[in-house]
Amino acid sequence: MLPHLYRLKPVVLAAVFVMLTALFSGCVGKTPFTDNAQLVPGRVVETLSSSVTLSLRSAEKHISGRGFMVYRRPDQMRLILLSPFGTTVMEAQLTGDRLTLAYPADGVAYQGRIKDLPAATGQRGFTMLRWVLDSEPPVGAPASGVVEQQASQGGQEQITIKDGVVLEKSLKSGELVRYRNHTVLAGVRLPLELQMESAEGDRIRLVLEEPEVNTELEEQMFTVPLNGLRLFPLSQLKAR
């Protein structure tokens, strides 16, 4: 049996969430190979809610877990990770560049800007977020093929395009983003499987299970309950 995410240290969970946000934000509404007859021109994902399965594979371990995620365009996301017994291990809320991480079992929560995360907790993931969000085909690129250009944050990137849509991006430094298992929901394209590889070889895989697209989501669904938790600056997040 694979170990579950509840065994991860807080700093690792923080990194997983930031990189997961990068993957999801960059992929929504941008994947090909679906039945175009179901698509509604100009329609995009405004909201999404879904049960999720999340796995992290590194050189040292392979960890998996389940949870729930909600998203609202352009920059609101909340993720809840559960233990095998159904209790909450971690809650994360992202609004713009502000991040809240709560660990109910430890009685603590952290808040601040993503840039305040200590380097070991996902600073690299935030850089990836900016890169993945820049996911439009380059001007003058072919409808299908592979092109190279200067990446938005520097360095060379390679972009794989099919039917006018970015399918995969990679950096010379080793980062890679893939969009897989595409479907059409509520008239928009959506990848049900999201993948990312870090330069260090860590792999994150997110699978959306029975997602609902463009339904009304109440504001409270994006709020992490902090009652009874000790609140600290995000800069103090560290392994314990």
Image: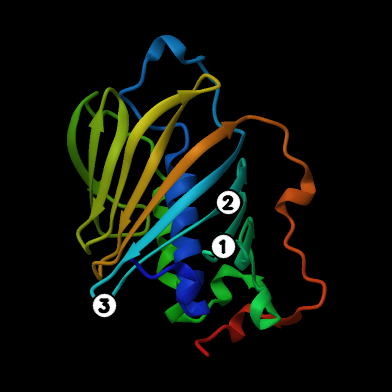
| Residue behind mark 2 | 68
Q: Counting residues from the N terminus, which is met first, the one under dot 1 or under dot 2?
A: 2
Quick one: 105 or 40, which is closer to the camera? 105
Q: Tell me whether circle 3 and circle 1 mark residues in contact (CB < 8 Å).
A: no
Q: Nearer the viewer, mark 3 or mark 1?
A: 1
Query: What residue occupies the far right of the structure in this picture?
Result: 227
Q: Counting residues from the N terminus, which is met first, the one under dot 3 or under dot 1?
A: 3
Q: Tell me whether circle 1 and circle 2 mark residues in contact (CB < 8 Å).
A: yes
How far apart in space, not on screen, are marks 3 and 1 (Cα)? 22 Å
Quick one: 85 or 149, which is closer to the camera? 85
Query: What residue occupies the far left of the structure in this picture?
Result: 146
| Residue behind mark 3 | 60
Q: Could you tell me if residue 133 is visible in this image?
A: no
SS for callout 3: loop
At 27% from the left and 59% from the top, the residue drawn is 175
Q: Tell me if 9 is positioned left or right of 166 in this view.
A: right
Quick one: 173 or 76, which is closer to the camera? 76
| Residue behind mark 1 | 82
At 46% from the left and 31% from the top, the residue drawn is 29
Q: Could you tell me if residue 234 is visible in this image?
A: yes
SS for callout 2: strand
At 24% from the left and 52% from the top, the residue drawn is 170
SS for callout 1: strand
Name the kind of residue labelled 2 in the image: Phe
Q: Find residue 177 and report its horizontal and vertical position in percent.
A: 31, 50
Q: Is residue 183 above or below residue 199?
A: above
Q: Quadrant of residue 216?
A: top right
How far apart in space, not on screen, are marks 3 and 2 (Cα)? 26 Å
Q: Residues within 10 Å of mark 3 (few under 14, many from 20)?
A: few
